[in-house]
Image: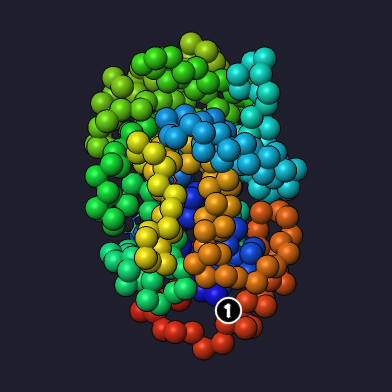
């Protein structure tokens, strides 16, 4: 069985994990944080925001749109098609509190900080690096910069509308989800989690002007977009390491397209037998059971077997 390690349990790592497992790889994810990720802070909608390069992003985003459109018909995925921009096409709304656990549900994930990708590659046939902003340290990548996003979350008193307005210096959005409403936002260069009350109040005021039914109480959440001049999606020359990070403000928007490119490259590093997936975005139960049966004695890795 071809063994793949994926570093990171944000949307990039989880989607790669699902796509690789579906293609027959024996996948293990390693993540410093499994729940407290940037991906968990996003609302999120499909929209190619603050991400480069344009041509590839268009291709990845189009492939992901089609996949989310299909997932909107899969019960329990947390994906729906909504009207955000008025006249235009509906876009996928990906409810991260539902979608991320749904992606995780058939994956083997260990909580572990990886400090050396080359060392990990000695234990696996292929290593996929989806560390997000963590790749700054892990790969010494100084092109990665944080784009801080501050959002407010309120209870949902029955609001079902969504809106996004992207002005030159200002980002305003109200996205209602099953259990809350997400109000945004910012995209600034600060690396601090401290949010001045006046900044939160300004976000709330912009959103309340659009949706007056918003409850007055809110929680504040902060995430750091992994901004880069271009997404890094490539095999590192002469190694078994495939990088997939730097998706800026659009990690969900490009997630399935990028994961499929990662799979294509991973197959050139370590060919895997093709398995038919269940086409709901998750590995088949039969495939997972077969992988567990055929895994046999594993090369030992110094990690706990705790599942999340
Ligand atoms: C407020 C906000 C709103 C957003 N809205 C949207 C939206 O509407 N639509 C959209 O498409 N995108 C949106 N984004 C952007 C999107 O959230 C990011 O592009 C995406 O989450 C990046 O995913 P990721 O998996 O690369 O990184 P992350 O979610 O940050 O995950 C990185 C993972 O790698 C792990 N890791 C890091 N270093 C190591 C290490 N050394 N060893 C082991 N594990 C490590 C982390 O613990 C984590 O598990 C938004 C972002 C913010 C902040």
Q: Is residue 248 above or below residue 295?
A: above
Residue linked to disc 1: 1
Residue 87, quarter of the rendered image: top right
The residue lying at 54 percent from left, 15 percent from top is 211
65 relative position to 218: left or right: right
**Is residue 129 in view from this perspective?**
no
Q: Is residue 131 above or below residue 112?
A: above
Q: How many marks?
A: 1
The residue lying at 66 percent from left, 19 percent from top is 88
Q: Position of residue 125 (x, y in %)?
A: 47, 73
Residue 32, quarter of the rendered image: bottom left
Q: Position of residue 276 (x, y in %)?
A: 73, 64
161 relative position to 41: left or right: right
95 relative position to 83: left or right: left
- Quadrant of ligand 1: it is top left
**Is residue 293 in view from this perspective?**
yes
């Amino acid at each position: 069985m071809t063994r793949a390690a994926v570093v990171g349990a944000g949307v990039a790592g989880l989607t790669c994990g699902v796509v690789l497992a579906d293609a027959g790889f024996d996948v293990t994810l390693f993540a410093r944080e499994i729940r407290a990720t940037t991906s968990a802070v996003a609302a999120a909608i499909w929209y190619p925001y603050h991400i480069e390069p344009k041509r590839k992003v268009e291709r990845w985003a189009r492939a992901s749109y089609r996949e989310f459109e299909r997932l909107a018909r899969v019960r329990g995925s947390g994906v729906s098609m909504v009207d955000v921009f008025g006249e235009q096409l509906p876009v996928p709304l990906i409810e991260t509190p539902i979608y991320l656990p749904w992606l995780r549900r058939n994956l083997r994930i260990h909580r572990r900080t990886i400090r050396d990708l080359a060392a990990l590659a000695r234990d696996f046939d292929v290593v996929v690096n989806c560390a997000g902003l963590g790749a700054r340290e892990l790969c010494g990548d100084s092109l990665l910069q944080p784009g801080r996003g501050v959002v407010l979350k309120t209870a949902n008193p029955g609001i079902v509308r969504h809106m996004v307005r992207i002005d030159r210096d200002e980002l305003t959005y109200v996205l209602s989800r099953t259990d809350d409403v997400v109000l945004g936002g910012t995209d600034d260069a600060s690396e601090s989690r401290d949010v001045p009350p006046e900044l939160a109040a300004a976000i709330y005021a912009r959103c309340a002007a659009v949706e007056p039914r918003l409850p007055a109480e809110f929680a504040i959440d902060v995430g750091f977009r992994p901004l880069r001049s271009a997404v890094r999606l490539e095999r590192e020359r002469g190694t078994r390491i495939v990088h997939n990070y730097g998706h800026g403000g659009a990690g969900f928007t490009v997630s399935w397209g990028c994961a499929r490119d990662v799979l294509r490259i991973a197959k050139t590093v370590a060919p895997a037998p093709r398995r038919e997936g269940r086409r709901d975005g998750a590995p088949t139960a039969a495939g997972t059971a077969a992988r567990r049966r055929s895994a046999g004695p594993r090369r030992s890795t110094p990690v706990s077997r705790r599942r999340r």
